[in-house]
Amino acid sequence: MLTCDEILGWLREDNPDRLASLWRAADEVRRLNVGDEVHLRGLLEISNHCRRDCAYCGIRAGRPSLARYRMTAEEILACAGAAAEFGYGTVVLQAGEDAGLTGSIIADIVAEIKFRYPLAVTLSLGERSDEELLAWRQAGADRYLLRFETSNRDLFARIHPALPGRSRDRFEMLQRLRQMGYEIGSGVMCGIPGQSYEDLAEDVLLFARLDLDMIGIGPYIPHEGTPLGAGPDDPRLPPERQAPNTELMTYKLVALARLACPQANIPSTTALATLNLASGRELGLQRGANILMPNITLTQYRRLYEIYPSKACIMETAAQCHSCMRRRIQSIGRQPGRGPGGRRCRGVATSTIELEEQR
């Protein structure tokens, strides 16, 4: 297991030859532990309503100018059917923290998806009550994704204010989700204003302590419609301490996450593609990732799920996205996976490549 100092050394590394050894090690650990298949998980953004006012997010409650939508059960089921036809093993239902998506509504949708289609169901619906989470698990949901965004609790509180009179600890919630029988996923943004290199190193160590089944990592992309993205009160640290929100830093974190959590499923994210449409996804897959998440949301809704601006591929149809993803996977000599692609086991296979000692 990498130490905090070793992780910090890699986060600050800029020598291409040394970084190449990190990419090779992460890719070998990926191959040994999760194989060469790239599993496709259909991403369905079912609502952009949100009761939270997160300082970085483009669908925050405090954006009255944003047109809101909430997909119907029939629309969701039709999109899930398309995912099954494409051969995906999983559908991911993602939304803002939408009070209109009640516990019973989601439970009914999950149960119907499981009845109709051979799909695993991942939910990413924010901080919800234990009663709702348990009901969704009993309805058949397999996984829950709840990103903690940063392990720095003070920074998290600044960018993600709690609802009045209500506060939930996301780390405790992840543990309860596991006790309920979910595979648990979390993740972070890198380069949040006010986030240090030390914060990112602690994020990687926390991935391992939580023994995450899924890890999502993306760069912070400023949105001018948010307090954090509008400036000029950007709470950025001095340059020598402020973690950058770059494509390179994202790859470093993907690789280090793979070394810290060899068995985890790690996507090469849409945010990476937004920074590098030509090859961001492919480079992520070659530096530790093993998942792609083609968007199966109906085209008329995609542009409204604007967590950050200029998101890649928002005008593609689900079929176009599917074809593109398969071509990208095959272009790097790998093949789309079959089945739900859950975590294989809790064992760890280590890399035969030794990382050079940090000095």
Image (cartoon, rainbow, N blue to C red):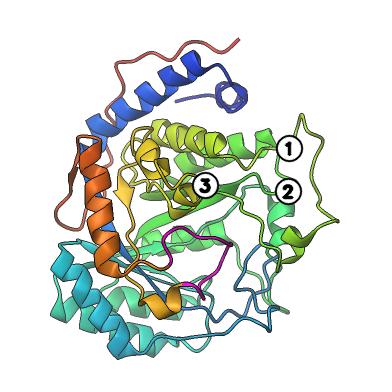
Is 153 on the left or on the right of 219, as rendered?
A: right
Mark 2, residue position: 193
Q: Residue furthest right?
A: 233
**Residue 241: where, in percent of width, then height?**
75, 33
The answer to if 310 sits in the magenta stretch is yes
**Residue 25: where, in percent of width, then height?**
36, 22
Q: Considering only vertical position in the picture, is 237 above or below 135?
A: above
- For residue 37, say whether it is visible: no
Asked if labels 1 and 2 touch by Cβ distance under 8 angstroms, the answer is yes
Mark 1, residue position: 242
Q: Mark 3 against mark 1, which lies toward the viewer?
A: 3
| First to last magenta residue range | 303-314
Q: Considering only vertical position in the picture, is 87 above or below 207?
A: below
Residue density around tag 2, few if under 14, some if 14–19, many if 20 or more, within 10 Å? many
Q: Mark 2 against mark 3, which lies toward the viewer?
A: 3
Residue density around tag 1, few if under 14, some if 14–19, many if 20 or more, within 10 Å? some
Q: Exactly how many numbered labels are in the figure?
A: 3
Determine which of the numbered discs, if any, sits on residue 196 in the image: none
Quick one: SS at disc 1?
loop
Q: Earlier in the sequence, mark 2 or mark 1?
A: 2
Badge 2 amino acid: Pro
**Residue 356: where, in percent of width, then height?**
47, 11
Determine which of the numbered discs, if any, sits on residue 275 in the image: 3
The answer to if 156 sits in the magenta stretch is no
- For residue 248, say whether it is visible: yes
Q: Main secondary structure of the magenta part?
A: loop
Is 264 on the left or on the right of 208, as rendered?
A: left
Badge 3 amino acid: Leu
Give the Cα distance between marks 2 and 3.
18 Å
Give the Cα distance between marks 3 and 1.
19 Å
